[in-house]
């Protein structure tokens, strides 16, 4: 009987410990968001900017009160569908992060760029 109770306690402990181990801390979730955005930036900048007509931009992230955090330039010569899927994934994960952790923001609206210009092979947002 005592072994049965011990086994039951060990089983319950293992179930609850697995649940708490899967919960990420706020910092771990923030790090995951940074890593995803780094992947987005790497894809966006995987092509040299030589012709501004081959570049576009989109908003990224989401502020706690709505609207993008900023804008990022990307080449139309990359896998644009994948790029925009990653942007949307980042936006949704940031929305969930903001809600879960009660994040607030300044609610300012970043200025939308007029376009992209190329400077020394790098894209620069033109305001």
Image: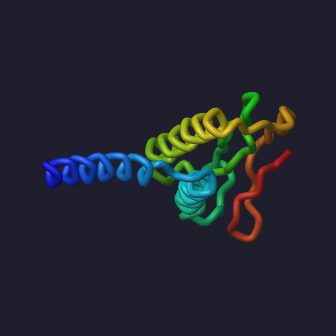
Q: Which residue corresponds to the image point at 72% horizontal and 45% vertical from the top-left?
A: 71
The x, y position of residue 60, in whole percent, is 65, 42
Question: Which of 20 and 99 lies nearest the eye of the viewer?
Answer: 20
The residue under the point 50% across, 53% down is 77
Q: Residue at x 50, y 47 (%)?
A: 83
Q: Where, by quadrant of the figure, is residue 56 drawn?
A: top right
In the displayed structure, would residue 114 be above or below residue 27? Answer: above
- Confirm whether residue 44 shows in the render: no
Residue 78 at what x, y percent from top left? 49, 53
Asked whether 98 or 69 is in front, the reply is 98
**Seen from this angle, which residue lies furthest bottom?**
120
Task: Indicate whether 102 appears above or below 30.
Answer: above
In this view, the residue in front, 19 or 111, is 19
Residue 85, can we see it?
yes
Quadrant for residue 110, please give it.
Answer: top right
Instruction: Give the x, y percent position of residue 62.
Output: 68, 37
What percent of the width, then of the height, locates residue 80? 49, 45
């Amino acid at each position: 009987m005592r072994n049965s109770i011990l086994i039951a306690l060990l089983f319950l402990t293992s179930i609850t410990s697995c649940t708490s181990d899967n919960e990420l801390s706020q910092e771990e979730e923030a790090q995951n968001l940074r890593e995803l955005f780094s992947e987005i930036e790497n894809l966006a900048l995987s092509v040299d900017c030589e012709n501004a007509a081959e570049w576009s931009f989109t908003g990224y992230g989401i502020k706690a009160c709505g609207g993008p955090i900023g804008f990022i330039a990307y080449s139309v010569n990359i896998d644009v569908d994948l790029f925009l899927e990653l942007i949307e994934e980042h936006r949704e994960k940031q929305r969930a992060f903001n809600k879960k952790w009660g994040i607030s923001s300044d609610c300012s609206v970043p200025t939308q760029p007029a376009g992209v210009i190329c400077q020394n092979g790098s894209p620069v947002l033109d305001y």
